[in-house]
Amino acid sequence: MPRILTFDSGIGGLGVVAQLRTLLPGMPVDYLADTAVFPYGEQPDAPLRARIVHLLGRAIDRLRPSVVVIGCNTASTLALDSLRAAYDVPFVGCVPPIKWAADHTRTGTIGLLATRATVRRPYLKDLRARFAPDCTLLAYGARGLADMAEAAFRGVPPDHKQLRAELDGLFGQPRGGEIDVVGIGCTHYTFLLNAMREIGPPDVTWLDPAPAVAKQTARIVAELNGPDGPGSPDQPERVFFTALPDDPATLQPGLHRLGYTQNAPCLFEPDRTSSPTSVTTGAVE
């Protein structure tokens, strides 16, 4: 049976895992969170790319996945091409849903909530030029949303005042009142969608790419699942962290809901060369 590895800097990619559970019931899905340098969004590009490529190489060697899902916009926009060049395994990335937003807007003004790294990267400008040339794109690099999402997954509702301040960074820009479609450019924000719909302006469509990423993964798995398709190790699926998360017990209820039954966090310890000294521990996806 094929096996999936989903990767993110924290819990964001678990929104993709939830969709995979619906589309591919019974399919083993391992999860790797690079919590040692969470969040990714303000790390310098070159050492972060090197870290991601090396870390996933170690994970591929150890876990033998049939397909790897990069459930992180920052990692996808930075390292997806390098990963595909380095390893002979299919990769599915998660990128800002600019084309989707352009297809759905009525006003011609679309919004994007993402990390500051995703907002500043040329990849976003290229997406806009290719898929939304006739639209006004307003993007906001939200520093606090990833942390709020991590807490929300642990059952802590977001502070409405803080969340409203982050949303104001998008809708408070010139022409922000014209935004009628907002794309989610960080998978962490999946866990804040209901609150953002409640607090944000009415009549705004919010686009979460997690279902589309899961569907693309399912298509690749179907192609691999023939009689000559690759197999995977017959072992329990696991959730791995590169550093012990804060209050790991608070993660357990959410992990159990997603089908992960392990009772203690599993440390994934790549060799030392996978952690460049210029990547800042504790800094940000």
Image (tube, rainbow, N blue to C red):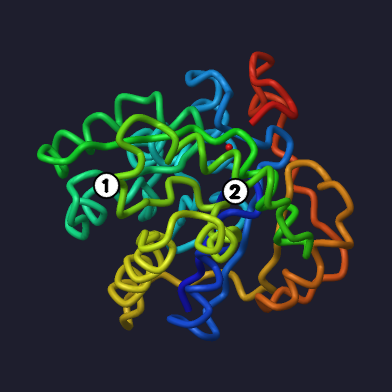
Residue on which the image places disc 1? 98
Q: Position of residue 285 (x, y in %)?
A: 58, 37
Residue 21 to residue 181: above or below = below
Q: Position of residue 272 (x, y in %)?
A: 72, 26
Circle 1 packing at 10 Å, graded few (<14), some (14-19), many (20+), is many
Residue 167 to residue 173: above or below = below
Say which element carries label 1: helix
Residue on which the image places disc 2? 59
Q: Residue, x 33% and y 35% (percent of image)?
A: 138
Say which element carries label 2: helix
Instruction: Give amino acid for label 2.
Output: Ala
Q: Residue, x 27% and y 37% (percent of image)?
A: 137
Viewer-closest of 153 and 47:
153
Instruction: Give amino acid for label 1.
Output: Ile
Viewer-closest of 214 and 57:
214
Q: Dots 1 and 2: beta carbons under 8 Å? A: no
Count of numbered badges drawn on the protein: 2
Upstream in sequence: badge 1 or badge 2: 2
Q: Is residue 48 left or right of residue 220?
A: right
Tell me the distance, in whole angstroms, between the alpha carbons under discs 1 and 2: 30 Å
Q: Position of residue 157 (x, y in %)?
A: 74, 60
